[in-house]
Amino acid sequence: MQRGRYDFPIVFLLIMAMASPLFAAGTPVKVWEEGVTIPTYLIGPPDPNPQFYFGGASQGAQHRIYPYPVYDNLTTEKKPKAYKMVYLENEYVKIGILPELGGKVFEAIDKTNGYDFIYHQHVIKPALISLLGAWISGGIEWDLPHHHRATSFLPMQYKVEENADGSKTVWVGELELLDRMCWAVGLTLHPGRSYLEASFRMINRTPVPTSMLSFSNVAVHVNDSYQIIFPPSTQFVTYHAKRSFTTWPIATTRFNGTDFTAGVDVSWYKNHVSGNSMFAWNYQDDFMAGYDHGKNAGIMSIADHNVVPGKKFFTWGTNPSGRSEEHLLTDSDGPYIELMVGAYSDNQPDYSWLQPYETRTWTQYWYPFRDIGGVKNANVDAAVNLEVKDGNATVGFYSTESRTSARVTLKLKDQVLLDEKIAISPGHSFVKQITLPSGTDEHDLWASMEAGGRELVAYSPVKLQSESMPAPVTNPLAPAEIKTNEELYLAGLRLEQFHSPNGDPNTYWQEALRRDPNDIRVNTAMGIDAIKAGLYPDAETLLRKALDRATASYTSPKDGEPFYYLGLALKGQGKLDDAYTQFYKSTWSAAWRSPGYFELAEIASTRGDFDAALIDDGHALEANALSVRALSLKAALLRHTGHRAEALDAVAALQQIDPLDVHGMAERWMAAKSPTNFASLLSTVTEHPATVLEVVADYKLVVGKKGPKLTLTPPGFTLPEGNKLQSGGVLVSVGRTVCATTGQRWKIWHGPCP
C-alpha cells in the first residue's frame, strides 16, 4: 500500500534518526523533598542582647553582626533531628540540599562509582566559626556577601523550578540583613549531564554603594592520597590579604609561618602538617580540582576566570591541632579540606563594589570525574589528563555526558601517536598509555578529544616562563606620611571597601580635607557615609562642597555622582523638589542614569503622578535591565493604573532575575489575586519575617495618597509575635492582629481589634 511519497518504515527510521539526540539526552531529572533524620548536637537559643560593633575581626574583616543575634550556646547533647532535604537526581549524580542549614549542598554522590565528591557529614556538629558563631563543616557553603557568612547555620528561602528543557532547579537564598542585600543560588541538574550548575544572583537593593565578597566553599574528604590541582600555569600561591607568597606546586620559602625552604610539594594534603590557606595566583584558567589517587576519583570546579578568578584551598593540617579541629566538627567522617572558588574576588578579604541597585549574575559548575589520574585542562564538557614519565605518555579523558562517537588524538608536532574513535560517558572514561619516540620534548605533545564536529577539550604541556614572585600587600602609611590627596582618598576607600578592622577611612579623608577642603572625591565619599548613617544635613554640606568645585566656571561635570548622592541627602530631609533637580542632573552621566531615574520615579510615584513615574522607571530599566527595585516599582505602577497583564509581565521579568524576591511575590498576588500566590507569599513572610519589613520599606518610599494598599492578611488574622505598626495606605502584617479602620488606614495590634 502506497503511503504518499515515502514508505512508512523509511519515514519512521528517518524520524528516529533525527530524534536520537533527544533520546540520548538522558532520563528525566528528578526533584523531590524528603524528610531525613540526622544526629545533631543541639545548640541553645541565641543571645537576646544586641551585639554592636566594638572592634574585632572575622576572616580579616570587621566582625559586625547586628541586627543578627549570636548563636554561641553550644552543647554536648546529641539527638536525632528531622530536616527537610531537597534532592536533585539524574542517571549520573544525586544531590541533596538542606535549606534549613544555610541552603548548603549537603551531599553529592557520583552514582557511577558511589563516590562522595563533596564531604558528606553524617552528623550535625556545630563549632564557633561563622560570623554568628555556630557553623558546620561539609558540603558546599555559600559564602556571600562575607566569608563564613552570618546565616550559614540558619534556614534559607528556597523554591523548586521545573524547566522546559527537562532540567530541574532548586533556588536557595535570603535577604541579608547586614547590608540589606539579597542573594540567591539556583542549583540545576540537567538530563544526561554529570555536572551541577549553580546560577548566582547578588543584588544591592539599596540606593547607596556597598561591597561584597563571594566564595563557594566546597568541602571534600581527604587522605594521604589526596592532591589539590591548580591549573599547570600556576606558579605562585598567596595567603589571606596577599600578605605572603610562595611557589607552586613545590613551595620553596617560608609561608604564613611555615618553613617550606627545603622544597615541599604542597599540592598534597599529607604535606601540610600545620593549618594553611593557599590562593592560586592564576588569572587565565577556568578550572581547579581535587583528586583522590587511591580511589581514582575527584571533583572538578569550572567557572569563567574573568568573573570567577578565585581558586583556594584550606586545610586544618595533619598535626594534633588540626586533627582536634576535625573532631570538633564531626564524629566519624574524617578529615576534610576546603576547595573554594571566588567570584569578583581572588582572595579573602577581597571585596568588590556593588553600585546602587546593581545586580550581579554569574555561573559556576562542579562535577565528579574518575579514572584519569588527575587533570591538566577541563571545561564544562570534558577533562583531559596527560602524564609523561619514563618515555611513556598516559593520556586520559573524562566526558560529562554520554558520547557514542568521540575521537581522541595525541600528536607529537605533526606526528600522530594516537587516533581512536571511542564511546565515552561519565561512567566510562578513556585512558591509554603510549610509548614516546626517543628524545621527545613533552611540550611538543598535543592531546585532544572531539565530538559532534567540535573540539571538546585539549591540552599541551605548559612551558612556564620564569617570573618574579609578586610583592606582598603592606599596611598603608599613617595619614600624615602620605604624600598626595589621591593616595589619601584611595587608602581610605580601600579600608572601607575591605571592611578593614585595622583602620578608619575617616582618618585618611579628614587629612585630605585638611589639605584641600573642597576635594571632590573625598567630600563625595564622606557624604555617602553620612547618608548611610542617616546624617542627611551633614551629607548635604559635604556634597555641595564637592559640586562647588565640580561645577566651577559653569561646568557640566564629567561624572554625575555628587549630584546623585546630593539628591539622596535632600530626599532624606524631605526636600523633594530640590532632590528631583539633583537626580535629573545625575542622569546626564550614563553611570548614574539608572539609579537617578529610579529615584525620580519614586518621587513621581510619591506625588501620585504614575504616568511620569512609569516613564522615569522605564528609563531606569533601559540603563539597568536587572534592577529588581525598578521592576517591582514598574509592576506596582502598572497594576495600580489598571494594566494587570503588563504588571504580571514585569513580575515575571523580576522573578527571572531573583525567583525568591518577596516584593515580586507580593505584586504577583495583588495583580493575579490567586489564592496559591497568597499562600506562597504568606508562608514566606511568616518563615522569614525580615523580608516583609523590607517590602514595607519599599512601599513606604514610593506610595503616596493614591498608592496601593498591600494587605498580606485579612482583618482579624492572627500572626506570630511582632510589633505594633500603623501605616497609611500600606499594610504589611508584622504584628499579631490586623484591624481595619476608617479610610485607607490599617492598624496592627498585639491584642484583639478595638
Image (cartoon, helix red, strand yellow):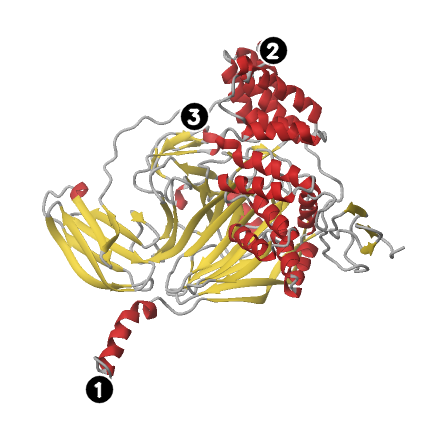
Up the image or down, 425 lies above or below 563; here it is below
Up the image or down, 250 lies above or below 549; here it is below
| Residue furthest to the top | 515
Q: Are marks 1 and 2 in contact (CB under 8 Å)?
A: no
Q: Quadrant of the N terminus?
A: bottom left
Q: Are marks 3 and 1 in contact (CB under 8 Å)?
A: no
Residue named by callout 2: 514
Residue named by callout 1: 2
Q: Camera-side residue: 8 or 225?
A: 8
Earlier sequence position, callout 2 versus callout 3: 3
For residue 544, which quarter of the picture?
Answer: top right
Residue named by callout 3: 472
Q: Indicate the position of residue 561 as horizontal and vertical percent values.
A: 55, 27
Mark-to-mark CA distance, 3 and 1: 81 Å
Q: Secondary structure at mark 3?
A: loop
Q: Camera-side residue: 289 or 252?
A: 289
Q: Indicate the position of residue 71 as horizontal and vertical percent values.
A: 68, 46
Q: Residue at x 36, y 36 (%)?
A: 283
Q: Is residue 138 visible?
A: no
Q: Indicate the position of residue 540 as horizontal and vertical percent values.
A: 66, 23
Q: Quadrant of the C terminus?
A: bottom right
Q: Amino acid at mark 2?
A: Arg
Q: Amino acid at mark 3?
A: Pro
Q: Secondary structure at mark 1?
A: loop
Earlier sequence position, callout 1 versus callout 2: 1
Graded by Cα atoms within 10 Å as few (under 14), some (14 to 19) or many (20 or more), the crowding at tag 3 reads few
